[in-house]
């Protein structure tokens, strides 16, 4: 059993939690993920390790409420226990010998991109961060991202905060102004990662994306997480989750991620109605 | 006087058209009367070919004699001198190619139903009251076991009985290995596996789930934590794909994924959250136990057509005979001598068909089986909405790639000597991690040998 020791709502649909998991905390590195299962009936759900405290033995996750399991998790409180919490899985993000990087987060992807920005910034790498949100009311982690970068650019789709528009526009502007960047890390919805990769390709800057296919075991045993990268079959849980964005078949990933949509949408309605009851 | 009936006593089974809609056990087991009657078919042969046919040399005529006398507990004790998972092996061993395959009674008529008797005896023991085993006096030495499949569980149990303090590190949230994530409930009720595991806990074995060794801890770190020896029983869980066009389409699974969703995550039960899509028509590629299990699960989930697509003929099929027979009774359709060439999908990427080519058998290949050759121009498309690849598995590279000094062969199988010792000091291995995908009884046997070797090593250390 893994005890929740901290819980903070970052916005209406994004929650931060720290969980007592000393073995995971001891080994965790930026870019890796965990898989949790709330209870005996639960699914195995992957979430990126947003932060960790080796001394306290805690691991922080930041998640967006999208369906049944994330709703259930968001309803748990400090002191409650999660049945299973396994990790650290996947490979840490490889910064190589980058000297100047752009880190891009989209929505809750900012939470996943943030630890990489922080790790690089701490290692003395110049980090420009671009964080994109739909609207002002869902902006998360602004102070944290600011503290982990040389420059932070925030965009909103509707222009209610920061710059109006998409992250790709800021990216193009930065690259056009000064093409001395040697690494781009983009994490967010699959379409965002696809368009960032398309935008950066002409500039020839290495672009890492963190893929989020459907997973079960996270150890290379089910093949459910397979993605096509550079024409080759890869298992995102053990070969990734980071891959070269210029090589990833994003359209295939989007198709495969839609597999359980119908059934999960039904479940979700079910849960949401329950939620209404609870929340008044 | 022995019972000279040429046939085994039938084991009661659920009706095929009932059972193919539920996940309850197919075979219902012998009653004591049936068991005694079947047991009297054994001739108590002096040269005991059956014992040599069993990979762990269970004292078959001896235990069967005890069954004849109605001493079922005695029979259980006799079996457990050599096997630690009789309720499992009695159900899933490929008996026709092991103990029963060489039984003298099989020369004329059917062999003695050794597997069914073993199962009966083990179930009898499980269902009767008996004292919990006493936790043995600790000898103060710690041993680590990686993986809670049959090999790891057996090794852990044998070492615990010798007084070692054993910790099993298991990657999944539940112990049991393939017995819980692969083999379905209707063939091996999970209750049985959980009871075996509870038995180990009574012996003092600690099981730490959610521990992916190679990630959360390395083998060297385990050793530095004070474990004086390590047994690796991590199995052969890495799925293979064919590499044919369309394999990334939506609706193509590895058998591991399909079976894990169903067996481990219980997607077939109301109230469990893991999703599984219901297919109308599904093709399972392969001819082993894994393929049969996947096909029979798909049928139970309500598919109208379930095809087994296998490129050789019935004769070469590696699955247990009984499972093939059960699958046919349940309405699984066999497309033999067919080789998949391409998965056809619609514009959204969802599977709509499996294109196959017909095969004929040519000359025997290296494995002695006749090599299938494609018949030119015989392509056809099987109308399916899902495809399951049950093509065999190989050992996961995670442990060997994170452990200095452990060697593996070309196929990724860990190299061990006759004592199950790897190329690294104090580290032993066995089961599918060493042999590649094999059988429960072989994995169990390897766990036993390793436990003995570890005991020897630590006594002399
Ligand atoms: C390696 C990895 C790291 C991740 N890290 C984070 C993170 O840090 N924070 C975060 O909020 N989310 C993260 N995700 C995504 C997260 O796992 C999914 O949002 C979660 O599985 C949804 O579960 P649910 O039961 O709440 O929703 P469900 O009811 O299962 O699904 C709701 C919708 O999401 C889709 N979906 C299901 N699983 C996934 C998936 N794995 N990826 C994308 N869409 C999916 C479904 O098709 C459906 O449309 C990560 C995914 C991966 C693979
Ligand atoms: C669907 C299916 C049907 C089968 N049917 C039959 C049958 O009818 N009869 C028969 O005799 N055999 C059958 N087999 C084969 C048999 O189940 C295996 O040969 C046997 O289970 C091997 O045992 P094992 O202990 O070596 O490995 P496994 O049972 O594979 O157990 C290995 C365990 O190690 C864990 N593990 C792996 N990596 C790590 C790690 N890095 N850290 C921690 N833990 C780890 C795994 O999660 C797993 O629990 C079947 C197999 C399958 C898949
Ligand atoms: S363990 Fe398997 S091979 Fe040995 S006697 Fe039992 S059923 Fe036969
Ligand atoms: S070979 Fe058959 S008949 Fe002979 S002892 Fe073994 S089980 Fe009995
Ligand atoms: S999640 Fe199963 S292989 Fe990656």
Image (cartoon, coloured by chain):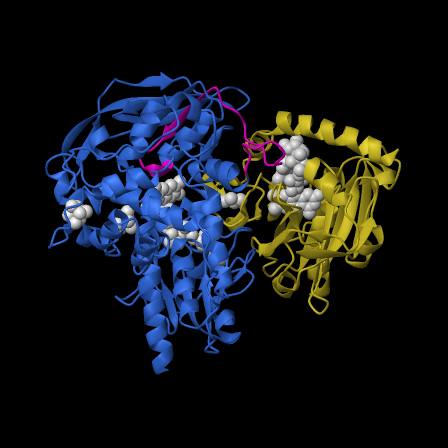
Chain colours: A yellow, B blue
Residue A63 position by quadrant: top right
Between B188 and A111, the one nearer to me in the picture: B188
x and y percentages locating residue B11 in the rendered image: 31, 34
Residue located at (83% from left, 35% from top)? A278
x and y percentages locating residue B221 in the rendered image: 52, 71
Q: In the rendered view, tell whether residue A179 sits above or below residue B419.
A: above
Q: In the rendered view, tell whether residue A117 sits above or below residue B206.
A: above
Instruction: Examine the structure image and report whether residue B288 is included in the region drawn in magenta.
Output: yes
x and y percentages locating residue B161 in the rendered image: 41, 68
Q: In the rendered view, tell whether residue B108 sits above or below residue B160.
A: above
In what quadrant of the picture does the N terminus of chain A appear? bottom right
Residue located at (14% from left, 39% from top)? B106
Between B148 and B313, the one nearer to me in the picture: B148
Q: What is the number of callouts on the image?
A: 0
x and y percentages locating residue B441 in the rendered image: 31, 51
Instruction: Examine the structure image and report whether residue B65 is included in the region drawn in magenta.
Output: no
Residue located at (53% from left, 46% from top)? A217
Between A198 and B390, the one nearer to me in the picture: B390
Residue B288 in view (yes/no) = yes
Residue located at (35% from left, 51% from top)? B86
Asked if residue B102 lies left or right of residue B320, the reply is left
Q: Which residues are magenta?
A: B266-290
Instruction: Report the magenta stretch's main SS.
Output: loop
Residue B242 in view (yes/no) = no
Residue A165 position by quadrant: top right
């Amino acid at each position: 059993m893994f005890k929740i020791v901290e819980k903070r709502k970052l916005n209406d649909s994004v929650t931060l939690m720290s969980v007592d998991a000393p073995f995971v905390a001891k080994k965790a590195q930026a870019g890796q993920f965990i898989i949790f299962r709330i209870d005996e009936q639960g699914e195995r759900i992957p979430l990126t390790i947003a932060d960790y405290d080796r001394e306290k033995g805690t691991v922080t996750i930041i998640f967006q409420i999208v369906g049944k399991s994330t709703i259930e998790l968001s309803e748990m409180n400090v002191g409650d226990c999660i049945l299973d919490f396994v990790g650290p899985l996947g490979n840490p993000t490889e910064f190589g010998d980058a000297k100047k990087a752009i880190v891009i987060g989209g929505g809750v992807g900012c939470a996943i991109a943030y630890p990489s920005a922080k790790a690089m910034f701490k290692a003395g790498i110049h980090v420009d961060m671009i964080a994109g949100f739909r609207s002002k009311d869902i902006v998360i982690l602004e102070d944290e991202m600011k503290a982990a970068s040389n420059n932070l650019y925030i965009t909103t789709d509707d222009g209610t905060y920061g710059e109006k528009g998409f992250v790709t526009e800021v990216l193009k502007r930065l690259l056009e102004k000064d093409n001395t960047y040697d690494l781009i890390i983009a994490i967010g919805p699959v379409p965002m990662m696809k368009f960032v990769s398309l935008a950066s390709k002409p500039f020839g800057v290495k672009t890492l994306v963190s893929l989020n296919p459907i997973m079960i075991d996270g150890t290379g045993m089910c093949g459910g997480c397979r993605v096509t990268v550079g024409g080759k079959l890869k298992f995102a849980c053990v070969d990734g989750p980071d891959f070269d964005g210029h090589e990833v078949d994003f359209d295939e990933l989007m198709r495969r991620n839609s597999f359980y949509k119908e059934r999960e949408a039904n479940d979700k309605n079910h849960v949401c109605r329950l939620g209404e009851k609870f929340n008044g | 006087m022995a019972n000279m009936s040429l046939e085994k006593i039938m084991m009661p089974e659920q009706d095929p058209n009932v059972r193919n809609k539920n996940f309850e056990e197919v075979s219902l087991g012998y009653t004591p009367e049936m068991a005694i009657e079947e047991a009297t078919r054994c001739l108590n042969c002096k040269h005991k070919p059956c014992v040599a046919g069993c990979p762990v040399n269970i004292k078959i005529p001896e235990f069967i004699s005890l069954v004849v006398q109605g001493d079922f507990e005695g029979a259980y004790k006799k079996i457990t001198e050599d096997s630690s998972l009789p309720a499992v092996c009695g159900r899933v061993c490929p008996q026709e190619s092991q103990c029963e395959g060489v039984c003298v009674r099989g020369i004329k008529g059917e062999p003695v139903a050794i597997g069914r008797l073993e199962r009966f005896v083990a179930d009898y023991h499980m269902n009767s009251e008996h004292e919990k085993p006493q936790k043995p006096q600790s000898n103060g030495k710690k041993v680590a076991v990686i993986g809670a499949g049959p090999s790891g569980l057996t090794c852990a149990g044998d070492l615990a009985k010798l007084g070692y303090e054993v910790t099993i590190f298991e990657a999944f949230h539940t112990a049991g290995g393939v017995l819980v994530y692969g083999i379905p409930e209707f063939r091996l009720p999970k209750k049985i596996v959980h009871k075996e595991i509870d038995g180990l806990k009574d012996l003092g074995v600690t099981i730490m789930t959610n521990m992916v060794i190679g990630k959360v801890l390395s083998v060297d770190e385990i050793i530095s934590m004070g474990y004086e020896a390590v047994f690796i029983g991590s199995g052969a869980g890495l799925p293979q794909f064919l590499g044919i066009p369309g394999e990334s389409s939506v609706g193509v699974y590895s058998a591991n994924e399909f079976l894990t969703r169903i067996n481990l995550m219980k997607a077939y039960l109301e109230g469990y959250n893991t999703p599984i899509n219901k297919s109308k028509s599904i093709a399972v590629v392969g001819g082993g136990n894994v393929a049969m299990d996947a096909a029979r699960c798909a049928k139970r989930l309500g598919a109208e057509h379930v095809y087994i697509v296998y490129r050789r003929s019935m004769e070469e099929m590696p699955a247990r005979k009984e499972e093939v027979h059960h699958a046919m009774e349940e309405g699984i359709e066999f497309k033999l001598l067919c080789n998949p060439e391409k998965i056809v999908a619609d514009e959204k990427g969802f599977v709509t068909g499996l294109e196959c080519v017909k095969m004929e058998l040519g000359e025997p290949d290296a494995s002695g089986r006749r090599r299938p050759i494609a018949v030119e121009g015989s392509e056809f498309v099987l109308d399916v909405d899902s495809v399951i690849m049950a093509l065999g598995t190989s050992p996961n590279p995670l442990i060997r790639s994170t452990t200095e000094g452990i060697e593996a062969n070309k196929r990724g199988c860990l190299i061990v000597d006759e004592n199950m010792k790897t190329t690294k000091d104090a580290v032993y291995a066995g089961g599918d991690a060493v042999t590649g995908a094999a059988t429960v009884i072989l994995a169990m046997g390897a766990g036993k040998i390793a436990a003995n070797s570890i005991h020897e090593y630590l006594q002399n250390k």
